Image (cartoon, rainbow, N blue to C red):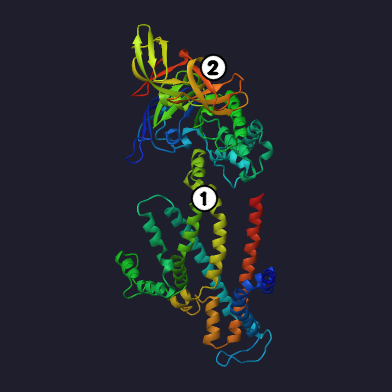
Amino acid sequence: MATVRLSTLKKVFGTNAPAVDVDELKIENGEFLTLLGPSGCGKSTLLRMLAGLETPTSGRIMFDERIVNELDPAERNIAMVFQNYALYPHMTVAENVGYPLKKRGVPKDERTARIAEIAALLKIDMLLDRKPRQLSGGQQQRVALGRAMIRNPAVYLFDEPLSNLDAALRSYMRNELIRLHAKLRGTMVFVTHDQVEAMTMSTRIAVMEAGCIQQLATPDEIYERPATKFVAGFVGTPAMNFIEAEVVPDGATARIKAGDFTLDVTQPDGMTAPLQGPLTLGIRPEHILLGQGTDKAEITVVESLGNEQIITIDTGRRELVLRSTSGEKHRIGEHVTYALRPDRLHFFAADTGRRIGPN
Amino acid sequence: MTLALDAPAARKSWRVSDPMLGFLLVLPSLLLFLGLIVYPLFQAFVLSFHDVSTLTLEGEYVGLKNYEDVLGRSEFWISFGNTVIWTVGSLIGQISLGILIALLLNTQFRGRSIARGVMLMPYMLSSVVTVMIWQWMLNDLYGVVDATLMAWGVTDMPVPWLTRMPNAMITTIMIGTWKLFPFVVITILARLQTIPEQLYEAAKIDGAGPFARFLDITLPQIKSVLLFILLLRGIWDFKEFDLIFLMTGGGPQIGTQTLPLLIYKEAFGQLHLGRGAAIAILMLIIMTIMFFIYLWYYQREEKRAAQ
């Protein structure tokens, strides 16, 4: 187990903009850190640099106090689980799991014992003589995990390992990974574009866009206080609503004018400057209340999930998405009133998209 | 009304049953197969039991005498041995050179597509051209090979590449390798390109060096293709005629004389068509045995892989 530290790490392919450009990232010993972002954001490239499969253009990667930039993948003592598992097709499950030990010259008896131990832990002990093609997706996933675990690596690297599984199995394996992390207490770096995976499993999440880390924080923090408009829009289903607005400060309060409605809010605490001028207002679907206030809208889409309804309303100027858990069944075409919870608003700078408040 | 009733009846008279239609569709190729493969094979079989002269194409039935003659002579066994040496030698050469070049061409480098094209050249040359090029290069008076070797001080005088044994066999095998390896490269390269890159990455992380990665990932992945090449090229090399015939004519003496050359010599040199046919039939039997060994091995491997 190790602490991983990256500084001024950059990877440039050809003459393109940097695929990865990270100033500083410290992954604590035993932490489950998720790199979350849309495809092409550089998360996989960053992971592959940690693995030693890609060479950084510049910058430094350190495992504990050791700089590993120049080390081969094998010398870094890492383990990686690939999206398609990358099991050796002609080897049995036991040979697959034992391969890293075999290549490190561990004697056969010891290997067999370790394989049995890991197989029992992952409940694949009855599959040891089978070939990968005879296994289901979930079983292959376990074998890949076993191959990663068998030599107690300093860092576990996961490259979207759950995305080839069907929904039920994915949720099951998420659960298993949480348990496994609690048991092994290993440093794990997990790459995914699925925010549910990121939110449910991580100690901390690093949200990436265009090669840069937009925010590094706990899942709750990311959800409650997204650092940029990008993070706010990327995390959360349905996505946060954004409204372009003009703010006029008035002492301790601020008047928000959005065209179809006006809202007075108290100036949030801990701000360097009072809210004013053009900015982007963000509000999560669960914080728009239906049947309250005086602003009017018409329901245009209703998506029923049984215990809740995802409702799209048309205010005449824009569409807003909200979540209704009241149990009341709404219908398309219904005229309703709505209100935004003033204590749950997020403010982002109109130009940079950075969070202004509340902090 | 009458028309409507008549039409299906008229059509019906043209209709043939499905099995019949299938047979009719296969018939042209069946006739070609019978005429061009089964008949000559049968003819050779019949000839091998007759003492037929190539000039008159007539002769009496002699039973197994041709076979007894052939098998009783050491020339047959020497030629058989030569055929095995040539086949095994050129197979080893082609496959090892083929794998090596295929691995090389599977890496990223500038001008890779040009290199792939150039690599194919020897395979595209006709045997006559290949032989002429090499005989010219290996010529003891004006050949570039001897001239270079002597200029570098490796040898003092021209090497008898094709006029001594075992030089002649080694040279022939090397030229065969040079001419035939591109087939191995193409087939293996096609397979190499389908091996997922992640297998190599996983192996790198698991601590496998370049050689271990070749043994543990590449080799098992190209194994089925290798078996296929082994069978196909094995058959082709076993009956290779033009390259050896043009290169050495079987010489020095009978040093590089393989079975196909012996057949030619018997049938057209010594005009013993029957005896030539007998050797041809013996060759057919040997190759059939080789094929069945391959088939047995291949099925065993398939079964093992499916488990």
Quadrant in the picture for the N terminus of chain B:
bottom right
- The numbered dot on residue B218 is 1
Q: Position of residue A329 (x, y in %)?
A: 61, 23
Label 1 or label 2, whichever lies nearer to me, is 2
Which residue sits at x=55%, y=76%? B259
The 10 Å Cα crowd at callout 1, few under 14, some 14 to 19, many 20 or more, is some
Taking the view exactly as shown, the residue that stands out farthest to the left is B151
Is A183 situated above or below A252?
Answer: below
Which amino acid is tagged 1?
Answer: Thr
Of the pair A285 and B303, the residue shown nearer to us: A285
Which residue sits at x=53%, y=75%? B258
Of the pair A256 and A94, the residue shown nearer to us: A256
The answer for which chain carries disc 2 is A
| Disc 2: which residue | A291
User: Is any part of residue A23 visible from this angle?
Assistant: yes
Q: Is residue A209 left or right of residue B58?
A: left
Is A294 situated above or below B23?
Answer: above
Q: Position of residue B245 (x, y in %)?
A: 47, 77
- Same chain under badges 1 and 2? The reply is no
Q: Secondary structure at mark 1?
A: helix
Q: Is residue A252 left or right of residue A77?
A: left
The 10 Å Cα crowd at callout 2, few under 14, some 14 to 19, many 20 or more, is few
The answer for which chain carries disc 1 is B
Q: Is residue B300 left or right of residue B239?
A: right
Q: Position of residue B23 (x, y in %)?
A: 66, 72
User: Is any part of residue A4 visible from this angle?
Assistant: no
Which amino acid is tagged 2?
Answer: Gly
